[in-house]
Amino acid sequence: MSSPILAVNKVSFHYSPEQVILQDIDLQLHQGEVLGIIGPNGGGKSTLLKILVGLLHQTSGEYQIQGKVHSLRTFPYQLFGYVPQKKELNSIFPLTTLELLQLEKNNSTVTNQIIDTAIQNYNLTSFLNSQINQLSGGQLQRLLIARTLLKNPKILILDEPSTGLDTQGIDQLGSMIKTIRAEKKQAIILVDHNIKQILKYADMVLCLNKQHHWHDKKEKLSKHVLESVYHCEYEHELIHEQLDSSTSSHHHCCDHSPQEVEKLEDES
């Protein structure tokens, strides 16, 4: 197998010795692979992504990109396309979909032809002239990913892209991920609280809860591993997953009422 495009070895991050965010994380990502990252809220997923894209620097451990160690000064930011959680984005600017895409022409590699191709490939035509603050969750997510891809990054990183999406939006997101992988051969890192989505699209899975719990092919992911990550029963995680899809909330460990369980069993 070729050398990994990303290699993380014993990476840790903390703001103080008493406030450990990540501890001894290992992962590898090869070109063309999809890596899924799962774990509970507060488990360090977003922090790890910010280290990977150069927004934070690890406290200890080694991080190599294409076989080289970089400082923040020499970091190859152009290799990455990072789509953070939508809650971190400001969508109040009075811009249309097309205007937001055209802002990327400030980058010398982005042309009108590249923008037109992205509009067609990712089905943005129907809302090109719509204000971005009026888009549905699915439309906004497609726009943000398409915009990120205009600069043709080697690695696409998506932080909880299915949050707040309905079933149609999730299906459209999945179709987009398949297209990106098939046509661009890019490496993709996908963080999501929806385990079913991760298992559907990822080749490898990293289970993260401040520490590196498990990292291997998705076929080897077991109930025991998931319980060790979430510290509660796997069946409870699946219940939360179904509840989250209708409430846009995130997983947390707690007891479930008999009424909730009975309702979900009836619907399944």
Image (cartoon, rainbow, N blue to C red):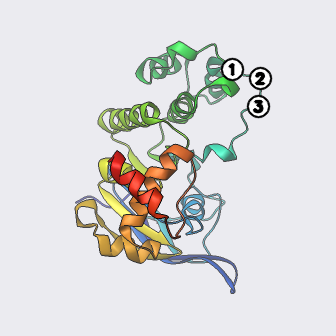
In the rendered image, the vertical position of residue 108 relative to residue 62, given as above or below: above
Residue placed farthest to the bottom in the image?
17
Residue placed farthest to the right in the image?
93
Q: Earlier in the sequence, mark 1 or mark 3?
A: 3
Q: Which mark is residue 94?
A: 2
Q: Position of residue 116 (x, y in %)?
A: 50, 16
Closest to the observer, 195 or 212: 195
Question: Which picture quadrant has residue 57?
Answer: bottom right
Side of 43 relative to 195 (left or right):
right
Side of 162 relative to 73 (left or right):
left
Quadrant of the image containing the N terminus: bottom left
Q: Position of residue 15 (x, y in %)?
A: 71, 76
Question: Which picture quadrant has residue 174?
Answer: top left
Residue 56 visible to an observer of this rendering: yes
Q: Which residue is label 1 attached to? A: 131
**Do the residues under discs 2 and 3 have CB atoms within 8 angstroms?**
no
Residue 6 visible to an observer of this rendering: no
Q: Residue at x 28, y 60 (%)?
A: 218
Q: Residue at x 34, y 32 (%)?
A: 179
Q: Which residue is label 3 attached to? A: 92
Q: Marks 2 and 1, Cα distance to the nearest angstrom?
A: 6 Å
Closest to the observer, 39 or 203: 39
Q: Marks 2 and 3, Cα distance to the nearest angstrom?
A: 6 Å
Q: Residue at x 30, y 70 (%)?
A: 223
Mark 3 Cα shell of 10 Å, populated few (<14), some (14-19), many (≥20): few
Question: Which picture quadrant has residue 59?
Answer: bottom right
Which amino acid type corresponds to the residue marked 2 in the rendered image? Pro
Q: Secondary structure at mark 2?
A: loop
**Do the residues under discs 2 and 1 have CB atoms within 8 angstroms?**
yes
Mark 1 Cα shell of 10 Å, populated few (<14), some (14-19), many (≥20): some
Q: Marks 1 and 3, Cα distance to the nearest angstrom?
A: 9 Å
